[in-house]
């Protein structure tokens, strides 16, 4: 449960730059998320980059559910492995 709490805190405070994804081991998508976040600062230079900002907003909202799903799936896999090893 500490992993989930840490991931959510990273999402809340540093989610825009993908810190929670780095913590969870998804480095490639964290870099992409960081680039989408940086598009906000490049918007005055190139107005079409607003699309990347919208993608970033949706992505951050999606991550609220992704974190829970990821750790729930990980916990079930560990539990299943323990049960399988005990029965053998």
Image (cartoon, rainbow, N blue to C red):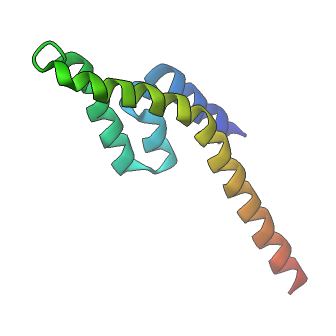
Residue 22 in the image: x percent, y percent? 43, 43
Q: Quadrant of the C terminus?
A: bottom right
Query: Which residue is located at x 47 percent, y 29 percent?
Result: 58
Query: Which residue is located at x 31 percent, y 41 percent?
Result: 32
Relative to 66, say whether 6 is above or below. above
Residue 7 in the image: x percent, y percent? 57, 35
Query: Which residue is located at x 76 percent, y 72 percent?
Result: 81
Relative to 61, say whether 44 is above or below. above
Viewer-proximal residue, 16 or 58? 58
Q: Relative to residue 79, is residue 15 drawn left or right?
A: left
Query: Which quadrant of the figure has residue 19?
Result: top left
Relative to 83, say whether 49 is above or below. above
Residue 30 in the image: x percent, y percent? 37, 41
Query: Which quadrant of the figure has residue 47?
Result: top left
Query: Which residue is located at x 79 percent, y 68 percent?
Result: 80
Viewer-proximal residue, 80 or 47? 47
Relative to 52, say whether 40 is above or below. above
Q: Relative to residue 66, is residue 15 drawn left or right?
A: left
Which residue lies most toward the right here?
Answer: 87
Which residue lies most toward the top here?
Answer: 44
Q: Quadrant of the N terminus?
A: top right
Residue 5 in the image: x percent, y percent? 65, 32
Query: Which quadrant of the figure has residue 64?
Result: top right
Which residue lies most toward the left here?
Answer: 45
């Amino acid at each position: 449960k500490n992993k989930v709490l840490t991931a959510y805190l990273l999402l809340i405070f540093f989610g825009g730059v993908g810190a929670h994804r780095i913590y969870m081991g998804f480095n490639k998508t964290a870099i992409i998320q960081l680039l989408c976040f940086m598009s906000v600062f490049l918007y005055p230079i190139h107005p079409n980059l607003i699309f990347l900002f919208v993608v970033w907003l949706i992505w951050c909202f999606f991550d609220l559910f992704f974190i829970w799903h990821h750790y729930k799936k990980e916990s079930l896999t560990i539990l299943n492995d323990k049960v399988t090893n005990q029965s053998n």
